[in-house]
């Protein structure tokens, strides 16, 4: 009898005994095979797979941390398996210590199976990368008074790969879309992408979490909104009859979001019970506390730094994922901070000037890079049409989320009366991309021959201008009616500029804004303010060139002006600069067809009243 009692006690303590009363904890019915199809082609799995090509782990042998002992004496390739009761009680322990509800069910178990069994090698790498990124993520979460468990969301999003990029363009540890990143201060150019900066992106993610929590006051709903957007969560709440629990609205959410929260809970479990699953971290060659930052104040390349400082180039690329093409476009007025191994910091400081000199000697042209990194002025916003084929489980909300647009825009583009789509349907989607204008600064310059001709023309016109100006104490302004746009929820300066075919630079100037931040309800001027008639005529040293008085009218003489096309200019925006001028008139004066596009540096004839 004692022997029987001892055997039962051993079984209970080891957790291998399957409880007869499994109804004690909520286990949902096993998802159908159709429900589990996502595992083979899923963004969460794709994030894990992105680590397989990460050079930071190449040629690394015997890197499993010796700090984590195999306290259960598992064989090297043994994969432990546990009953539901063990998973349930372990998650209960984690749930007690977390403000985020950590529920166990079969959806969560499916992702425990993914991270602990099917993707064991990748999970070991994630455990190693956590040694680099968790300290800085926890520091930011603590600063914003957010649950530290949110650090595990970065694993679901990117598998802690700072260079991860989704098929829809989301980038970095926290997978920010381009325009969402802009809302939270993450800038992107051809050479630098703040979304890939672990510190900046984590700060932006914390602000986003805080904003979402102020809406829902429930962390699982915050996670769902982070993935699919507040609009999709709000629709799911309405369709569920006003339920405010993730598990109650789950069936109304996009397919990807239905998986997102269970994956987050599963990652919480696996990261805390990795040893119980015979998982140990593959340690990177350099960990966070072994690195430091230095300021770069002149252009450099990652490859040159790696060569001179004797650091593997893949290490420097991994530590500095912000620089998309390995080029650091730094200047004295706009320095960049790079992360180096601590042992190399002194070498950089002692040889800083020679490094900058070596960059010049190698034949690089800093001006070539600088012209393409000058914010909006060196870029054109180009709208491209793509075709999206609706897949099973998608809805118009999830598609809008993928392409960073609104459901109303998708309905308008495709002449849809209702917000419903069907499997296999093809939708026209218009996406906005920024295209660098090579040598944009130089294009705006007039050739010496053109300058001579225009100066002569302007000089010939000076006498007639002087006659008009003399005797006038104050020049009469050209009447231009101000047009305004009221900022709506979800709008930002770039989107407003694109809507009205003007540049961000113009909006900043017209509204005397110091930065790009706008708030809901703010009035933004979308056309150029009035200019004095004399000032318009006298702009011989700018992009407008007064040539001659060519015409008599009821209002007096008219002037022919040559306007030099700037980055972001359209016929509409040029017409708006002058009172009474229409797009059709500009086309007629310049023999332009309706399909002909303007080019930066092109001279456009404009006839304006002389006043």
Image: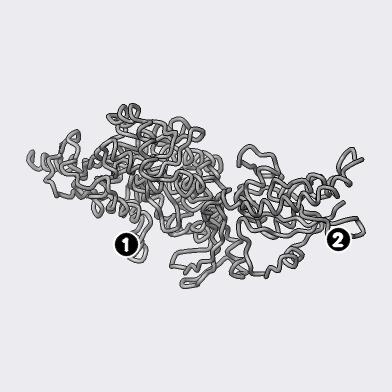
Quarter where residue 91 is shown = top left
**Which residue is drawn at the image coordinates 35% and 36% (left, top)?**
134
Identify whether 26 is placed above or below 136: below
Dot 2 crowding, Cα within 10 Å, few <14, some 14–19, many 20+? some
* Nearer-N-terminus badge (2/1): 1
Q: Could one spot residue 173 in this view of the protein?
A: no
Q: Nearer the viewer, residue 19 or 449?
A: 449
Quadrant of res 414: bottom right
Mark 1: give few (<14), some (14-19) or many (20+) Cα within 10 Å: few
Report how far apart the C-alphas of labels 2 and 1 lie in the structure.
72 Å
**Residue 42 location, x and y as percent?**
36, 59
SS at badge 2: strand
Residue 40: assigned label: 1
Residue at 27% from the left image edge and 29% from the top image edge: 343
**40, above or below 87, in the image:** below
Q: Give 513 or 484, whichever is nearer the viewer.
A: 513
Image position of 77 (left or right of 552): left
Please state the horizontal and vertical placement of residue 544, each as a whole percent of the image: 72, 51
Residue 118 visible to an observer of this rendering: yes
Q: Residue at x 58, y 48 (%)?
A: 377
Q: Decide if residue 54 is on the left or right side of residue 188.
A: left
Left or right: 229 in relation to 364: right
Rendered residue at 55%/63% (across/down): 430
The picture places residue 276, in percent across and down from the top left corner, at 21, 42
Taking depth in this image into account, of 513 and 520 the one nearest to the observer is 513
Tell me the mark number nearer the camera, choosing from 2 and 1. Answer: 2
The residue indicated by pointer 2 is 551
């Amino acid at each position: 009898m004692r022997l029987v009692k001892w055997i039962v006690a051993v079984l209970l303590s080891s957790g291998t005994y399957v409880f007869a009363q499994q109804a004690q904890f909520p286990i949902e019915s096993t998802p159908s095979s159709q429900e589990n199809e996502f595992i083979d082609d899923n963004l969460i799995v794709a994030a894990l797979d992105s680590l397989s090509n990460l050079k930071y782990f190449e040629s690394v042998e015997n890197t499993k941390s010796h700090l984590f002992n195999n306290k259960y004496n598992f064989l090297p390739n043994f994969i432990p398996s546990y009953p539901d009761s063990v998973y349930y009680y372990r998650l209960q322990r984690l749930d007690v210590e977390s403000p985020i509800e950590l529920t166990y069910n079969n959806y969560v178990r499916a992702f425990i199976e993914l991270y602990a069994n099917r993707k064991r090698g990748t999970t070991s790498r994630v455990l190693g990368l956590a040694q680099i990124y968790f300290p800085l993520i926890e520091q930011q979460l603590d600063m914003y008074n957010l649950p530290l468990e949110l650090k595990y969301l970065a694993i679901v999003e990117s598998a802690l790969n700072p260079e991860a990029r989704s098929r829809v363009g989301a980038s970095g540890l926290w997978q920010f879309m381009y325009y969402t990143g802009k809302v939270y201060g993450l800038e992107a150019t051809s050479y630098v992408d703040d979304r890939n900066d672990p510190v900046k992106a984590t700060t932006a993610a914390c602000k986003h979490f805080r904003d979402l929590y102020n809406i829902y006051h429930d962390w699982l709903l915050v996670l769902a909104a982070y993935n699919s957007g507040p609009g999709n969560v709000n629709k799911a709440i309405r369709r569920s009859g006003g339920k405010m629990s993730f598990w109650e609205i789950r069936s109304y959410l996009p397919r990807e979001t239905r998986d997102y929260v269970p994956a987050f809970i599963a990652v919480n479990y696996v990261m805390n019970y990795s040893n119980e699953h015979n998982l140990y971290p593959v340690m990177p060659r350099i960990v966070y506390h072994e690195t430091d930052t230095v300021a770069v104040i002149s252009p450099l390349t990652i490859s040159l730094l790696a060569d001179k400082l004797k650091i593997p180039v893949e290490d420097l690329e991994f530590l500095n994922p912000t620089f998309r093409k390995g080029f650091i476009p730094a200047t004295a007025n706009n320095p960049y901070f790079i992360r180096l191994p601590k042992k190399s910091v002194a070498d950089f400081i002692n040889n800083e000037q020679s490094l900058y000199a070596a960059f010049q000697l190698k034949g690089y042209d800093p001006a070539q890079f600088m012209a393409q990194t000058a914010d909006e002025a060196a870029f054109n916003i180009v709208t491209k049409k793509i075709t999206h084929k609706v897949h099973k489980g998608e809805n118009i909300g999830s598609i809008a989320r993928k392409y960073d647009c609104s459901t109303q825009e998708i309905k308008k583009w495709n002449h849809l009366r209702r917000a419903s789509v069907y499997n296999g349907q093809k939708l026209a989607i218009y996406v906005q991309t920024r295209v660098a204008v090579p040598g944009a600064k130089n294009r705006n310059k007039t050739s010496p021959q053109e300058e001579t001709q225009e100066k002569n023309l302007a000089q010939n016109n000076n006498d007639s201008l002087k006659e008009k100006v003399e005797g006038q104490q104050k020049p009469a302004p050209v009447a231009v009616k101000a047009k305004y746009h009221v900022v709506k929820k979800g709008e930002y300066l770039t989107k407003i500029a694109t809507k009205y075919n003007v540049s961000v630079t113009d909006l900043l100037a017209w509204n005397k804004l110091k930065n790009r931040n706008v708030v809901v309800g703010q009035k933004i001027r979308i056309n150029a303010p009035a200019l004095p008639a004399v000032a318009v005529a006298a702009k011989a040293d700018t992009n407008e060139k007064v040539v001659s008085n060519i015409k008599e009218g009821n209002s007096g003489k008219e002037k022919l002006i040559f306007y030099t096309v700037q980055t972001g200019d359209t016929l509409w925006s040029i017409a708006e600069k002058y009172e009474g001028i229409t797009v059709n008139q500009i086309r007629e004066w310049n023999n332009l067809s309706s399909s002909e596009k303007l080019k930066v540096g092109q001279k456009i004839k404009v006839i304006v009243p002389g006043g």
